[in-house]
Image (cartoon, grey):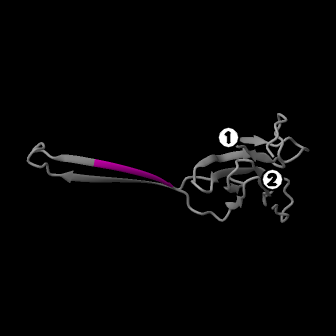
Amino acid sequence: MGNATSGSNTHIANATGRRVHVFYSTDRMILYEMQVNTRVGAQVGAAEKSAFGSVRLANNTRLVYHRDERIRSFFIPAHDFNKVAAEGTIYMSAYYDDTGNNICQNYHIPSDRSAILTPQGNVKFQKYGSSIWEDEHGNRYG
């Protein structure tokens, strides 16, 4: 896969076994809005039930991130990697594409370092100067 459009040496390798969606920026990504929706419902009790009936509360909280032109993203198929098209330190957030579940948020990656998304859903730094699939401790993922 890869992307040769920048002078960056930063790559993200996907060893999760699933397609992932990676967002990255040179600034920390921030939460712009939190929506809390509360619904109240009432039900009148039947003759055999309590005369008071019942009240039901439902709370639904949703975090909203607004698109920022400085935040870029790409998909990485399982067992593949991509080059980050930004120079310097980046902050990465990654999600499983099939469920939207979070792998990491605002994970700090120093300049000219690469990262591996592991099968356990962790982030490990790649061993500098080695294979994209080998972490700093010598563990191989690819």
The answer to whether one can see residue 28 in this image is: no
Q: For label 1, count other residues whose C-alpha is less than 10 Å away and answer few (under 14), some (14-19) or many (20+).
A: few
Q: For label 2, count other residues whose C-alpha is less than 10 Å away and answer few (under 14), some (14-19) or many (20+).
A: many
Identify residue type, mark 2.
His
Residue at point 69%, 53% (across, down): 27
Identify residue type, mark 1.
Gln
Q: Main secondary structure of the magenta part?
A: strand
Q: Nearer the viewer, residue 98 or 43?
A: 98
The location of residue 50, given as percent across then percent down, is: 12, 42
Number of residue marks:
2
Earlier residue among tags 2 and 1: 2
Is residue 102 located in the magenta-colored stretch of the structure? no
The reply, left or right, for residue 51 in relation to residue 35 is: left
Q: Which residue is mark 2?
A: 11
The magenta segment is: 57-63
Q: Under tag 1, what secondary structure? A: loop
The location of residue 64, given as percent across then percent down, is: 51, 57
The location of residue 131, given as percent across then percent down, is: 88, 46
Residue at point 84%, 49% (across, down): 112
The answer to whether one can see residue 8 in this image is: yes
- 127 in relation to 84, above or below: above
Q: Quadrant of the N terminus?
A: bottom right
Residue at point 62%, 57% (across, down): 97
Verify CB contact (< 8 Å) between mark 2 and mark 1: no
Q: Nearer the viewer, residue 96 or 78?
A: 78
Residue at point 56%, 61% (across, down): 66
Quarter-wise, where is residue 23 in the image? Answer: bottom right
The location of residue 6, given as percent across then percent down, is: 84, 62
Q: Under tag 2, what secondary structure? A: strand
Q: Which residue is mark 1?
A: 120
